[in-house]
Amino acid sequence: MEGQNMIFAKENTSVVVPQAYALYSNPETGENYTVMEQIHRETLLSLWPELSQSDKDLIMTTLRSYFDEMRRLPSPGYYGSLGGGAVLDEIFWTKEAEASINGPFASEDAVNEAFARKYVYDGRPPFRAEFYRQCLPHILHGYSPTFTHGDFQRKNIIVQRSEEEDQMGQEVNQGMRVVLSDWEKSGCYPSHWEYCLAVCAL
């Protein structure tokens, strides 16, 4: 699914993603494979402390434009993976398929109910699940399904800097290519999803 997500992002936005060269499945095992471009540069996680403020501002502006563009894509009318499949984030994972937890979901109420069901599925106290059933519809409502990267954190942002030397032999930054990698969990999530996951990742 990661390959399809990257192709979708590349065809419908100007977000810079690794090039997917081939997608194929092993019919015997059901395993899916993606042959893709390997990006050689540093992740934002390792690079951030050494960046200048102007570089940081440029990266943040670029990332903001990426997510604004994804937010402007037409809503598919469901919460799930591309093509109407189950939600791919492990928050919704179950050993055996359970549509009420894995999706796809036709409504925001169904997404909120899935949170409560998954809580019980994981062996946690039912009284907390009931608390979620009462509270989440009041807190998490009005967030339409939006195409979402699904794992937005600094380790999945690759920065390529093109540099050349000036007349004094000093390196001069000539620009940056900001690449979003790891599209495995992408899909149509509530529009708050990217923000919530980024907060958790930090």
Image: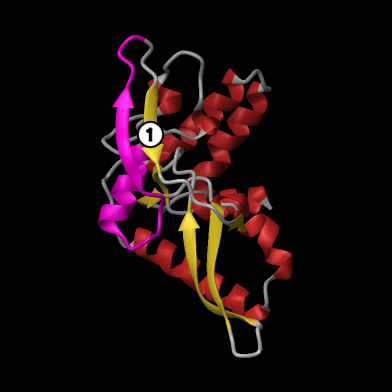
Nearer the observer, 49 or 190: 49
- Residue 194 lies in magenta, yes or no? no
Q: Name the spot of residue 115 as percent of width and height, x first.
A: 53, 33
Rendered residue at 49%/53% (across/down): 192
Rendered residue at 47%/32% (across/down): 113
Nearer the observer, 23 or 202: 23
The span picked out in magenta is 1-28
Image height check: is 185 above or below 181? above
Residue type (three-letter) at the residue carrying disc 1: Thr
Side of 128 relative to 78 (left or right): right
Q: Is residue 70 visible?
A: yes
Give the SS element for disc 1.
Answer: strand
Q: Quadrant of residue 74?
A: bottom left
Nearer the observer, 137 or 165: 165
Side of 165 relative to 187 (left or right): right
Give the residue furthest to the right.
Answer: 49
**Residue under numbered circle 1:** 34
Image height check: is 96 above or below 135? above
Give the residue furthest to the top.
Answer: 28
Q: Name the spot of residue 202 as percent of width and height, x first.
A: 69, 53
Is the N terminus in the top left, top right, bottom left or bottom right quadrant?
top left
